[in-house]
């Protein structure tokens, strides 16, 4: 059957397959358990059983990894292009973007100030001063969606600790992708967002119709646990984005649609295609909703709380920030005591997890024995 | 395999800008596609009968679905997935010339 190489003993094949499979199953179960806990917390916030305690604006430290092939020097984008992206984020996540006034009247009350700002890191992981920009030459002509840009071993740039920084990689991407994200709960070594250089910022190599910096706004939405507004159900109306105040819509919208656009019996107002979590052009998306703000808060105060703790350490006393060891030692003191309902939540999580893991195990057994069951 | 339309082996991405009412157009994966926010669907026919479909994922990158493909005597391509991993379907390849794969919608 195979034309290349010498055939390997089947027993070794099977053994290797089992090892890979067990590793995947382990990763899958870890990821599932993390996602279940994150989703449960989001639900608590959505139902009002937990509320954000946060009234202040938080500032998240960002490190931008510019990974470029020296044969194409323009891929080594300039500082101005990077700063233009940070500016866009600081408007979009504060609802101070100049186009927010274009939100249809019926949805204006839903427009949310996420109270999150972004700042290029001023201290690196060792506590040394930095401008928050890393420039890494590579032999790669372009990167795929396989996380290759996130590791030096594959021609990319290793992340800074993703519990303290938002890592953004900017590079040439294949397959016409504008960018991609990783949801919270995934492996820390690949946590962050990847953006095509020509869809990054508003100047330099940024090219229409993706030169409004909105690709990063969208990807950071995922990074803060937002789903696509149409629910990723491929045109069906069966699944939504787990946010109540965004209308159920059938599929993604592209380009610059005209209001109203009706799908899924969602009239008279139709799809909220001007939401950052749809797929419209940069010029056609300009809002997050209150429900999305709640979901992002659940994430920021849950699985991504380490970024907020980091801010507490960095902000008030500059002297305290000079010693990373002191910062680390202080982290446990910042942790909240158990809330009311914590036990109930844990029980609920455990039950759901047990069921999911059982499904995984049955599926794994089915693959081994050749009986996929379902 | 002998009934496979000539030239179909390879990895293709949906060039949706070139679609018509009745046909979907695919081009080789390394074609200089225009950047697009909606993830392009992909089809890959390997010589050993492996089929890899790329479907848009929730994190803006394609998800791989691995199955099998087999050419039918009438030139259609039968696609199947391991049980429980996707419904089987048929592709009606209308033409495959000069790096342009045209499939009936
Ligand atoms: Zn997305």
Image (cartoon, grey):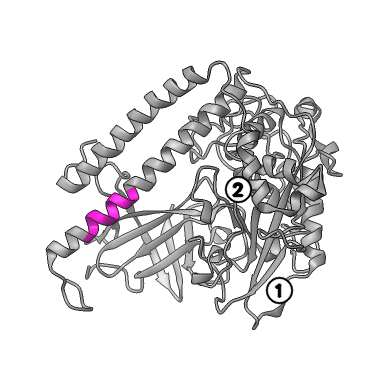
Q: Nearer the viewer, residue A113 or A130?
A: A130
- Protein chain holding label 1: A
In the image, is the residue at mark 1 within 8 Å of ligand 1 by its beta carbon?
no
- Apparent side of residue A75 relative to residue A4 in the rendered image (left or right): right
According to the picture, the residue beneath numbered tag 2 turns out to be A163
Q: Residue at x 39, y 26 (%)?
A: A350
According to the picture, the residue beneath numbered tag 1 turns out to be A76
Q: Which of the 4 image quadrants contains residue A126?
A: bottom right
**Residue A319 x/y as whole percent:** 80, 50
Would you call the spot at circle 2 few (<14 residues within 10 Å), some (14-19), or many (20 or more)? Answer: some
Looking at the rendering, in which quadrant would you find the N terminus of chain B? bottom left
- Which of discs 1 and 2 lies nearer the camera? The answer is 2
Above or below residue A54? Residue A3 is below
Q: Is residue A119 magenta?
A: no
Q: Residue at x 81, y 42 (%)?
A: A316
Q: Residue at x 28, y 70 (%)?
A: B47
Mark 1 residue element: loop
- Apparent side of residue A164 relative to residue A31 in the rendered image (left or right): right
How many badges with numbers are in the image? Answer: 2
User: Sequence order check: which comes first, mark 1 or mark 2?
Assistant: 1
Magenta span: A16-24
**Residue A351 x/y as whole percent:** 37, 24
Judged from this view, the residue extending furthest toward the bottom is A71
- Apparent side of residue A77 relative to residue A365 in the rendered image (left or right): right
Mark 2 residue element: loop
Q: Nearer the viewer, residue A31 or B31?
A: A31
């Amino acid at each position: 059957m195979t034309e290349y190489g010498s055939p390997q003993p089947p027993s070794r094949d099977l053994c290797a397959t089992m090892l890979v499979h067990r590793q995947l199953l382990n990763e899958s179960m870890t990821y599932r358990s993390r996602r279940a806990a994150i989703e449960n917390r989001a639900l608590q916030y959505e139902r009002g059983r937990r509320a954000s305690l946060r009234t202040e604006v938080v500032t998240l430290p960002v490190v931008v990894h510019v990974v470029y092939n020296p044969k194409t020097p323009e891929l080594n984008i300039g500082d101005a292009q990077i700063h233009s992206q940070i500016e866009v984020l600081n408007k979009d996540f504060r609802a101070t973007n100049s186009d927010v006034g274009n939100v249809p009247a019926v949805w204006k009350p839903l427009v949310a100030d996420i109270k999150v700002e972004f700042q290029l890191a001023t201290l690196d992981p060792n506590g040394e001063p930095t401008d928050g920009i890393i420039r890494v030459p590579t032999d790669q002509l372009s990167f795929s969606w396989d996380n290759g840009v996130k590791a030096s071993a594959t021609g990319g740039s290793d992340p800074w600790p993703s519990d303290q920084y938002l890592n953004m990689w900017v590079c040439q991407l294949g397959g016409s992708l504008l960018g991609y994200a990783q949801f919270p709960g995934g492996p820390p070594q690949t946590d962050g967002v990847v953006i095509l250089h020509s869809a990054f910022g508003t100047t330099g190599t940024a090219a229409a119709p993706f030169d409004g910096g909105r690709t990063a706004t969208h990807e950071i939405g995922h990074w803060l646990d937002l789903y696509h507004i149409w629910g990723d159900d491929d045109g069906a109306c069966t699944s939504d984005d787990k946010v109540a105040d965004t209308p159920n819509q059938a599929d993604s919208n592209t380009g610059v649609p005209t209001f109203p656009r009706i799908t899924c019996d969602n009239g008279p107002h139709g799809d909220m295609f001007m939401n950052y979590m749809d797929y419209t052009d940069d010029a056609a998306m300009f809002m997050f909703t209150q429900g999305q703000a709640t979901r992002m808060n659940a994430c920021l105060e849950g699985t991504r709380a380490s970024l907020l703790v980091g801010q507490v350490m960095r902000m008030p006393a500059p002297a305290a920030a000079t010693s990373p060891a002191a910062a680390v030692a202080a982290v446990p003191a910042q942790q909240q005591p158990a809330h009311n309902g914590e036990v109930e939540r844990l029980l609920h999580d455990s039950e759901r997890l047990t069921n999911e893991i059982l499904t995984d195990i049955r599926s794994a057994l089915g693959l081994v024995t050749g009986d996929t069951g379902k | 395999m002998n009934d496979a339309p000539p030239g179909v082996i390879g990895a293709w991405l949906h060039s949706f800008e070139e679609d018509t009412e009745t046909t979907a157009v695919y081009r080789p994966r390394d074609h200089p596609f225009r950047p697009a926010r909606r993830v392009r669907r992909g089809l890959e026919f390997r010589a050993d009968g492996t089929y890899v479909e790329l479907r848009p994922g929730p994190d803006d990158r394609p998800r791989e679905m691995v199955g099998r493909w087999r050419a039918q005597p009438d030139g259609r391509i039968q696609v199947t997935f391991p049980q429980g991993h996707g419904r089987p379907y048929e592709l009606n390849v209308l033409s495959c010339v000069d790096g342009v794969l045209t499939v009936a919608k």
